[in-house]
Image (cartoon, rainbow, N blue to C red):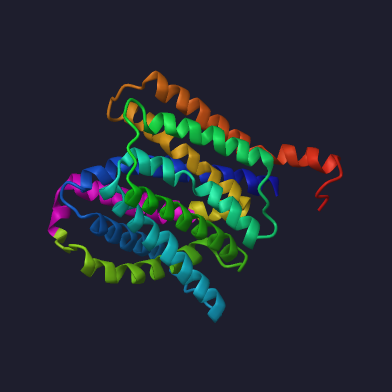
């Protein structure tokens, strides 16, 4: 059990390290691709990769399970990314970055309501406040806070949608199927729900664009790494740790972004960003350390489950 927990934490950490660097690839591709094109290409590529790696069919599912797979695909693959991209057209990237990081809070609330085995504890909420303070320092570093109701609400909705995906993933993990098979099925539904949006946005197939090796490398990174690999490792982490403990790793995305910006883009780290990084990591540790508090609570004779 302990080994499984360690593997879960390592999986979540690997996922977040890769997801924290995707902004570079996305930024490069946005020079010649629409957001919906990047989204479609990366998940189709991710689905094909999972089919090659694990070609066995998913058998024995019932109607209720298929509906859960479909809901997860709609939330985690289609709606979340579309809402995030649309939000970016209305409001500042820093606003979106901070608001999206509220997802663990929503996950804790939804898990408490729908997954009886996961209950948020005091240390989780303390860690949430500390981490959000750090994320705000990183995101608004040297810039003014500018609110845009439409964009900010869309980002908040995206955070809620990701929380729904995390809870659905935990539910799916209880079905007993292989993680790659369930991830593949979720991808299928996500792509199906994505198809109507291709007509709403200016989608062009134009595969000749990938003749550019820079574009090809970056879409491969997003498709094989950030989609195929990361959704499997994230779903495994949710299965091993639970939706709440896994979602807390989302706090690390801005930290990874700062480190990547310094290492790859040679940007300078400011004092505010450094303090924000320390606070964010502290918040993560506080939220993950809720089990210590739980032990203390049990000793006082409360929640002795």
Q: Looking at the image, is 208 positioned above or below residue 266?
A: below
Q: Residue at x 63, y 62 (%)?
A: 114
| Quadrant in which residue 268 is drawn | top left
Q: Is residue 188 left or right of residue 211?
A: right
Residue at (56, 77) in percent of width and height: 64
Magenta residues, as a range? 208-232
Q: Is residue 204 magenta?
A: no
Tell me which residue sits at (33%, 52%) in the image.
150
Residue 222 shown in magenta:
yes
Kindly report the secondary structure that dominates the magenta region of the rendered protein: helix
Residue drawn at x 49%, y 49% as measured from the top left: 103
Residue 290 place in picture, x, y as percent: 68, 40
| 265 displayed left or right of 108 | left
**Horizontal and vertical percent position of residue 46:** 36, 59
Residue 238 visible in the picture: yes
Q: Position of residue 73 (x, y in %)?
A: 43, 66
């Amino acid at each position: 059990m302990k080994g499984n927990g360690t593997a879960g934490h390592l999986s979540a950490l690997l996922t977040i390290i890769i997801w924290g660097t995707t902004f570079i690839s996305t930024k490069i591709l946005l020079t010649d691709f629409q957001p919906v094109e990047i989204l479609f290409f990366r998940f189709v590529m991710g689905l094909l990769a999972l089919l090659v790696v694990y070609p066995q069919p998913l058998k024995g599912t019932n109607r209720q399970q298929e509906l859960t797979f479909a809901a997860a695909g709609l939330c985690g693959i289609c709606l979340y990314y579309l809402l995030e991209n649309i939000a970016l057209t209305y409001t500042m990237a820093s606003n979106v970055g901070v608001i999206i990081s509220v997802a663990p809070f929503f996950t804790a609330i939804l898990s408490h309501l729908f997954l009886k085995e996961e209950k948020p504890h005091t240390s989780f909420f303390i860690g949430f406040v500390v981490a959000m303070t750090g994320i705000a320092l990183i995101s608004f570093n040297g810039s003014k806070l500018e609110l845009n109701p439409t964009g900010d609400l869309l980002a908040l909705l995206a955070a809620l949608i990701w929380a729904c995906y995390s809870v659905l993933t935990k539910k799916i993990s209880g079905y007993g199927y292989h993680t790659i098979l369930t991830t593949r099925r979720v991808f299928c539904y996500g792509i199906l729900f994505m198809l109507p949006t291709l007509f709403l946005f200016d989608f062009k197939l134009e595969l000749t664009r990938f003749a550019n090796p820079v574009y090809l490398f970056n879409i491969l990174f997003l498709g094989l790494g950030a989609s195929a690999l990361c959704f499997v490792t994230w779903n495994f982490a949710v299965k091993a740790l639970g939706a709440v403990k896994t979602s807390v790793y989302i706090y690390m995305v801005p930290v990874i972004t700062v480190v990547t910006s310094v290492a790859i883009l040679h940007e300078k780290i400011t004092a505010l960003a450094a303090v924000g990084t320390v606070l964010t990591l502290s918040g993560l540790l506080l939220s993950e350390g809720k089990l210590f508090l739980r032990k203390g609570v049990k000793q006082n004779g409360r929640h002795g489950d």
